[in-house]
């Protein structure tokens, strides 16, 4: 198979080169299989270039040269990050951040928020968008945390693996994989990788994940190729790059610092 250097079947998820069951590893820039061979092997394999941790580190290095080095910092106590992230779902920071500040200034603590009526909470966060849905999720999630823990302290999650801690959080009302990952990354400094629309778009264009990959699978596949110590930088830098250069419409491809490693740019 001309141009194919390696065949890997779900091997070395923590190694330098990662591939999933339906992938054939092809060197970046190398030609794919000829049409006849693709027909021959297509029923068994999905042919695509595969990036490993060395490629991801190069991507991070190029983005750091462009945007600077992000410092991993905690944004607040884990339960605060949980509520902030629920508020930010399907809306912008411009809406969610003022809503969170009003919520905090309206109650003396999480005990009061959890005990407040949905109408009281909704009045504080109505500018955050989807007020009724988010009000219910916030109240239910806080109530479940208190029921399961006896308090609102989530520091105990640091003793778990990332996967177990995320699973625990995803059992809370209104908490999906991205919200859970945000709590771990920004509230507990654990290397969970949240995939928002910017990270998803940039990673897809680079060829780190396939077009059409589900959001949940994107989290798993990106965490497999991003080293734990690089997760925070990767997340922040891809968001910055997605906002400034790799936009959904009219991306600045010709002057992009990643054009030499980008599958989307390579297709012209």
Image: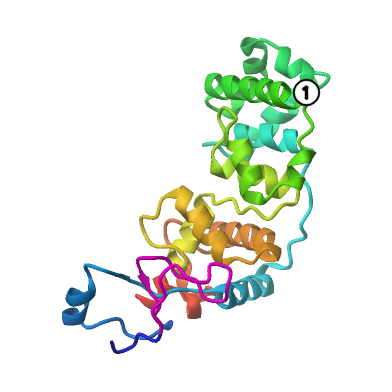
Callout 1: few (<14), some (14-19), or many (20+) C-alpha neighbours within 10 Å?
few
Instruction: State which quadrant residue 125 falls in.
Output: top right
Q: Looking at the figure, which quarter contains the N terminus?
A: bottom left
- Residue ID at (63%, 40%): 93
Residue 119 x/y as whole percent: 62, 10
Q: Residue furthest right?
A: 108
**What is the secondary structure assignment of the residue under circle 1?**
loop
Q: Position of residue 246 (x, y in %)?
A: 50, 63
The magenta stretch spans residue 88: no
| Colour mapping | rainbow
- Image coordinates for residue 128, horizontal then vertical, percent: 60, 29
Residue range corresponding to the magenta coloring: 6-26
Q: Is residue 160 visible?
A: yes
Look at the magenta stretch and give its main secondary structure.
Answer: loop
Image height of 179 relative to 255, above or below? above
Q: Is residue 257 visible?
A: no
Q: Residue at x 68, y 58 (%)?
A: 232
The residue carrying mark 1 is 150
133 versus 213 height, above or below: above
Q: Is residue 197 left or right of residue 154?
A: left
Determine whether, in the image, residue 77 is placed left or right of residue 263.
right
* Residue 117, image quadrant: top right
What residue do we see at 44% from left, 73% from top?
Answer: 50
* Image quadrant containing the C terminus: bottom left
């Amino acid at each position: 198979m001309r141009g194919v250097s390696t065949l890997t079947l779900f091997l070395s998820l923590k190694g330098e080169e990662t591939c999933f069951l339906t992938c054939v590893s092809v060197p970046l820039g190398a030609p794919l299989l000829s049409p006849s061979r693709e027909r021959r092997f297509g029923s068994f394999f999905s042919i695509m270039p595969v990036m490993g941790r060395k490629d991801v580190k190069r991507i991070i290095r190029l983005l750091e040269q462009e945007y600077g080095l992000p410092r991993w910092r905690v944004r607040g106590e884990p339960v605060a990050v949980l509520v902030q992230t629920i508020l930010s779902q399907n809306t912008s920071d411009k809406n969610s951040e003022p809503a969170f500040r009003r919520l905090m200034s309206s109650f003396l603590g999480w005990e009061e928020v959890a005990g407040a009526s949905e109408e009281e909470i909704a009045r504080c966060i109505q500018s955050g968008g989807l007020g009724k849905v988010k009000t219910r999720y916030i109240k239910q999630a806080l109530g479940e945390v208190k029921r399961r823990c006896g308090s609102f302290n989530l520091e105990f999650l640091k003793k778990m693996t990332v996967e177990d801690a995320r699973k625990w959080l995803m059992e809370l009302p209104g908490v999906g994989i991205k919200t859970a990952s945000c709590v771990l990354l920004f509230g507990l400094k654990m290397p969970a990788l949240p995939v928002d629309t910017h990270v998803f778009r940039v990673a897809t264009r680079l060829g780190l994940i396939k077009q059409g990959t589900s959001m949940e699978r994107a989290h798993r596949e990106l965490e497999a190729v991003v080293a734990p110590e690089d997760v925070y930088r990767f997340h922040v830098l891809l968001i910055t790059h997605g906002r400034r250069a790799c936009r959904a419409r009219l991306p600045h491809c010709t002057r992009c610092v990643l054009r030499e490693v980008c599958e989307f740019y390579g297709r012209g």
